[in-house]
Structures are given as structure tokens and as C-alpha cells.
Amino acid sequence: MYRFRDEHGRVIYVGKAKSLRSRLNSYFADFSTLHPRTQTMVSTAARVDWTVVGTEVEALQLEYSWIKEFDPRFNVRYRDDKSYPYLAVTLNEEFPRVMVMRGAKRRGVRYFGPYSHAWAIRETVDQLLRVFPVRTCSAGVFKRQNRLDRPCLLGYIGKCSAPCVARVSPEEHRLLADDFCDFMAGNTSRFIRRLEGDMREAAAAQEYERAARLRDDVRALERALEKQAVVLPDSTDCDMVAFAEDELEAAVQVFYVRGGRIRGQRGWVVDKVEDVSTADLVEDFLLQIYGEGESVPREVLVPALPPDEAAMTELLAERRAGPVRLRVPRRGDKKALLETVARNAHEALKQHKTRRASDLTTRSRALHEIQDALELDDAPLRIECYDVSNLQGTNVVASMVVFEDGLARKSEYRRFTIKGVEGQDDVRSVHEVISRRFRRYLAESEKMGELDALGDTESAEGDEGAHQPIDPETGKPRRFAYPPNLVLVDGGPPQVAAAQRALDELGVDDIAVCGIAKRLEELWLPGEDDPVILPRNSEGMFLVQRVRDEAHRFAIAFHRQRRSKAMTVSELDTVPGLGPARRAALLKHFGSVKRLKEATPEQVAEVPGIGLRSAGAILAALHGTGRAGDDRGERA
């Protein structure tokens, strides 16, 4: 296993090779024959380190861990541009809930999908709730209906068993949830047969209304099944993976087949760094996607087997806790379906290239326009923008947003609480933020061995997410370790001068500074009497505006969050001698201050940590009939 690092020590590529000497020779042989992205990687790399492992399985595991940990910019990363919805059943709750869920998977929740559209899930769930009336409401709605002692609309129309009002016991409701999961997992026939049998019995007993309801339930299940095309035998559980690729990019599509039916679909488009084969792409895909928590099926059908099939099969079997089969279908229905998946991948790549062509051209033009206008030595591949937000000098905060290659890199965003400035003073606020950010950069650079001398290393306390540097050999990303090519501040000459002064005081002289004034969208450089004017319709101006607007949005959001938190004051906060722990205990016990006011001193004294004397004082303070300060002998 080897890692390329750039001049700042950042891991930019992770790879594995049986012979490190031959692999490195292939990188540094004839530069002109390398893949375009490989040329960029080799020219960016400053050093390489490596780790020896014993087996191919260990190499695969370490490669996945490093890619996840370091996020190398030149590795193939399977990311899509949207979050796919899943149908989730929260089996970890007393009363499981059926819901549409996106994002990271949670422990104790059973997932079905992913699906292309959330509306497709909701239509299916709406049909199934006739037969499996499982709870679908949020925790807040559940508690509210429980307090009101009446079910919601779904409970009245028969699409919820109403566990909130104890119409069913927890055991009965969980049985409904288990049956719902079994049906979604493909065990459909037994439920339809059971309902048809009940329908015939009801008809024979002349219970025609009940028979009609059961008939409608059968039709609802059949309609839910009709939405999922039957493509393979009922016992088939597999993922079908296909690729479409050119010299620079590759698109992958996955069809999830469960119980012989297509349950979901998902796609990615990735950049190719090296001249990798389809087999290498398959290996990267299997390693990353199933390493992120995706459930591993019994069989995975691929267009080509990975280079070390045995090691990959063993790794997947470990993650599934059961046997897994990797196979390339040669004939029959599975081969035909894999060809359909491949056609979807070709269409996805075609659409992506149509969108990406103009996008790449636009971003490149914008960066070069900014470079020319500001007379920079290089294009500003990393831009950091700072904005200050306050309300009449209160709750002063600042934001830092990062754009790399013209795209927002939200994992690098930072938020600052301004502590050394009183009142509405944007100039001093900008100076403080720039000073704190680049002090941290200098401190972390010294830890990485890049600087022999260091100025003020005052802690960046108040920087949201800031932390102390770590061992540079780990290569883990540091919050402030990578310098920008351009610092952009929201403001005119005073703010720009403050930012430049902060950098000069720290001895940072290789970073350009610029400000953008809101009124005429002028760009101000330090020490210049006249602004730089970019054409109003230029791509460079659009990019600067997007960066500035994103910094403004991020700062406003943080300011509103702090202001809202400061303004949220409960009546309990005004009761003297009542600490946070006892306030939380009272609210947890009674649910609201209103219900607390209606309680008797004896009922309040039932709360742990509250004595009878304290209870009387609390109620007196809330009702305004006395002073809670008499309770001097007790503390929260």
C-alpha cells in the first residue's frame, strides 16, 4: 500500500501494488504517455510513503480505510449528486414507524431500496397500510395524540392501528411491522393467500362487508406488487452492476433485485485517474459501496471479475456474515437484464458529459478571468471567503467558506464567534477572524514540519470545530492546514486593509487578498485607490458573487442560530435557585410549563431532586404569589 502526498503533506492518492518499484517506475517513465489526470497527480505529488501488508484481503481493507479517512482527490470515488430515498422501518423503537429516509443508515432500522423517487415509496406505502396499518407519524405527532387521547386521521380511516391510544399493544404492533417487512422483503405470496382464504371464509359465513374489505386488501397488495416488475425467479436476491466508460470518466448503474423484482436503482459518475480496466473499477466499486454500509446480497453480478476475485469474495462474505457469489452472467435472463443496466449506464454517462462539458469550461474560464483581473501568478484554485454578521453589534459571528476548482467544499467551511470586538465594528472583526484562521494555519504548518519559526500561537478558541494539530504522519485532514490562493472578504477598502494587515502581522506574504463591495460589485485590492471592475456578465464575476453570497448565507445562518438560542428563555429560567438539571427534570416530567403550573406541590415533589419546600417555592414563583428565593438551602 502506498500514498502520494502533496507539498503540504495532504494525501492525494492511495494505491496498492505487489511490486512498488515497478508501479512507481510506471508513473515516472515517459510523462507524455501518462493519462491526463495521472500527469496532474504526479506533478502535484511531493513524496510517497508505503505500508507492507500480509495478504490481498488486508490490502483491500486498508485501501478502503485510507480512502475513507483521507478523501484523496485523485482516487476514484463513487459519489452521486443526490441522496436516494429508502423505505425505512424503525425497528429500534417501541412502536416501529414506516417512513421515507435519506442519508446515512442508522442502527436498528431496516431499509428497503434505494428508490429513484420518494413519491414511488409513498404510493407503495399507501397501498400497504390497508393491510399492515403500521404507524407512520413522527414522534411529536405520536405524543400529541397520546396526550389528546384520540387518534389522528389515519387511525380513523383504518390506515393506522393507532398505538398512540392503545388500540393495539406493543407486541401486536410489532407483529404488524414484521409482516410489513416480510412483504417488502419479497415474501408476498403467503399474505395474499391468507387474505384470500379469510375472504372466502367471510363470504361463506355471509359476512359480506368483511369479505369486501378483504377483497380490497388483496387488490391493494396486488397493485403494490404491480409497481415492481418481475424480472427473475422469486428466489433471486442480487445486485446487478454495469459500467460505461471513456478515457476520462466512468458511469456505473446498479439494479437491486430482491425476490425476483427490481426494488431500486442507483447510479454514479466518477473521474478516472489512471488507465484502469473495468475489472479495477469493479474492485473499487465493491470495496467502497459495500464498505459504506450498503447491505451485501447473496449474489453480485458484474461485467468483469475483480483482479483478485477470491480476496474480494472473502471480504464481502465477512461483511455479509454469509456466503457471497461474484459472477459474470454469460446467458439467459440475468445476462439480458445486465445489458439493460449497461444501457442505463451509457445513458447516464452521456447525460453527465452533456452537463459537465459546459460546467468545466465555465469554471475554468471564471478562474482564469479572476487570475488575469487580479494579476495573480496562478489561477485561484482554492478561494476562502469571509463575512461578518451581527445585529446592532450583538451576537457578532463570522463565516469562512471554501471553493476549490470553482466548487463549494462544504467540509472545509468554518464558523467563528467574535470575542475580541465590541459593537458593530466589521473592520476589527475581519482582522480578528483572519488572524485566528492563519495563526492556526501557521501552527499546524509547523507541526507538519513546514516552518522553522512560528509567531503567535494563541489558541483559536471560539472557532467552531477547531482542534489541536495531530501527528503529520497520519495524514488526517487538519481544519486549517491548507492555505488558499485567494482570500476574499465581503467589504471594501477598510475590510481589505484589515485582512492584509492581519496577514502582514503573521508574516504570511504569499496569499492574495481581495474584497468585494456590495454596492457596485467592485473588487478592491490592498493599497489600491481604484477598484478592479470585472464585466457584469463575466464568468469571473458570477463566481465571485457565488462565493460571496455563500459566505453571507453561512454567516447569517450561524447568527440566527445564536440569536434564536439567546432569545429562547423559559419561565423556569427566571426562578431563582433552580439550576439547569432540575429545570430539565421538571420539563421532562410534566412536558410543559403550563402543566407544571397546574400541578400541586406534592406532584412537583415527585420529581427527583425536588423537595416539598422547593416545589412550593417553584409554584409560588411561577404563579407570582411568592418568592422562590426562600429556598436558600437547596441547590440544583
Image (spheres, rainbow, N blue to C red):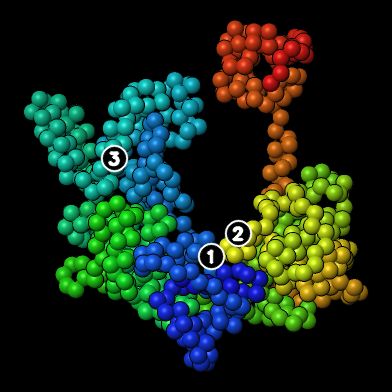
Q: Is residue 465 above or below residue 36?
A: above
Query: Dots 2 and 1: beta carbons under 8 Å?
Result: yes
| Mark 3: amino acid | Phe
In the rendered image, residue 400, in percent from the top left (x then y), is placed at: 71, 59
* Secondary structure state at the residue bearing disc 1: loop
Q: CA distance from mark 2 to mark 3?
A: 38 Å
- Residue 251 placement (x, y as % from top left): 40, 72
Which quadrant: the C terminus? Answer: top right
Q: Name the foreground residue: 404 vs 98.
A: 404
Residue under the image location 19 percent in, 60 percent down: 232
Q: Which residue is mark 3?
A: 180
Q: Secondary structure at mark 3?
A: helix
The answer to whether the residue labelled 3 contacts the one labelled 1, judged by CB atoms less than 8 Å apart, is no
Which residue is the site of mark 1? Answer: 71
Q: Residue at x 62, y 25 (%)?
A: 584
Q: Residues within 10 Å of mark 3 (few under 14, many from 20)?
A: many
Asked if one can make out residue 582 in the rendered structure from this viewpoint, the answer is yes
